[in-house]
Amino acid sequence: MSEYLYQKTNHYFGQLASGTEKYGMAELQELGATNIKPGYLGVFFCANQRTIYDIVYRTRIFSRILAPLIVFDCHSEKYLYKTAQNIDWSDFLTLTKTLAITSNVADSNINHSQYAAQILKDAIVDQFREKTGERPSVDTRNPDLQLNLYIYQNKARISVDLGGGSLHKRGYRVESVEAPMQETLAATILRLSEWKGERTLYDPFCGSGTLLCEALMKQCNIPAAYLRHKFGFLRLPDFDASVWNQVKTKANAEITEMADELIKGSDISADALKAVRTNRSALPDVGKIKVRRSDFKALEPLENTTIITNPPYGIRLGDQESTALLLKEFGDFLKQKCTGCSAFIYYGDATLVKKLGLKPEWKQPLRSGGLDGVLCKYELY
């Protein structure tokens, strides 16, 4: 076994959505990371073995946590192949385990991400074939080993994805509706709202319940990866099962119960409410989320409530005219029926902010799933 870069330096990299770096850095500090520094589309940090397992298990904001194996100058396909073959891949894989590769290239001689991933994959399987006459299989959906290749200005980094895939996939979203909110975005919005369970949280456009489920997980200290079965760090050559079991046991022991009806929501769609109930049932039984079918205009007045929501827009609603009307009516609802409330509204399209008819206290750009969205806070008196 060689000593890899993450072992020599305790350096790791966390990927997250643009606009969320500040909140990701704060979360890393809370989870015990050190030397935290912003980077391109993510954050560099240091952590010991126990802490890195804990970060992967608990992080709500990061989509990937990467352990770098090697960093090298990479001016050609040939050099990428040759350098990748210098790694002993039997440290990470056996013939019975599967692999997949995510790749991102920019401003480099190799200018196609998929092609770069193919070269790395060929280097790995050719090494096994030369040694054993057989090769491991690729599984892009649920691999045992997820690798990440990043090439920027002809400098390459090969890393192990410690979550074994994107960490936004919590595992509770069994059913969905059109254009659901990504779990990491919902968690970031909750963090920005500073809601800590001191009063009721309500989502009047709850959809399949991502915001509600993330609120439950946050309030009850359920680790974000609680339902995850595969982790990439299990494939590291220095993986320590006893340390991982201690980290997992400690985190799970900190799960707490929540008062029923602290988290509520509604939606006009019966399918959406069915999805909420199905998704909620996948999480530990530590408190009920109350949802009902209702148009927001028919809701009783809300008082002293934290409203967090992502109103339908664009592909979810159909056309801009309908979206503008809905937001105007929702703005009227907030003004007339939500005395003493704070509202946090995420717009997937930032141009829609003015349609609500209320002046936000602040705006925070949040990019997710290709959308240049914005979160706005409104204090309702």
Image (spheres, rainbow, N blue to C red):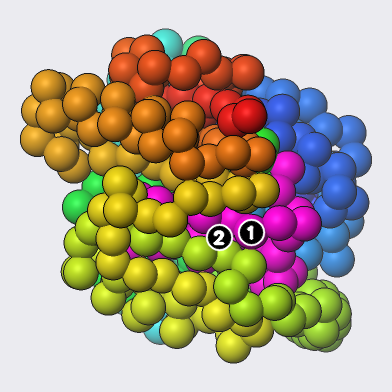
Q: Amino acid at mark 2?
A: Glu
Q: Circle 1 sits on which residue?
A: 200
User: Which label sits in the foreground, 2 or 1?
Assistant: 1
Horizontally, is 101 left or right of 315 in the view?
Answer: right
- Residue 332 appears in which quarter of the rendering? top left
Q: Is residue 117 magenta?
A: no
Please, what secondary structure does the residue beneath circle 2 have? helix
What is the number of callouts on the image? 2
x and y percentages locating residue 162 in the rendered image: 61, 59
x and y percentages locating residue 126 in the rendered image: 35, 58
Residue drawn at 15 percent across, 39 percent down: 317
Identify the image quadrant of the N terminus: bottom right
Instruction: State which region is magenta.
Output: 194-223
Q: Circle 2 sits on which residue?
A: 214
x and y percentages locating residue 71 in the rendered image: 64, 33
Residue drawn at 51 percent across, 73 percent down: 289
Horizontally, is 46 left or right of 197 in the view?
Answer: right
Q: Is 168 rendered above or below residue 103?
A: below
> Crowding near pointer 1: few (<14 within 10 Å), some, many (20+)?
some
Between 153 and 335, the one nearer to me in the picture: 335
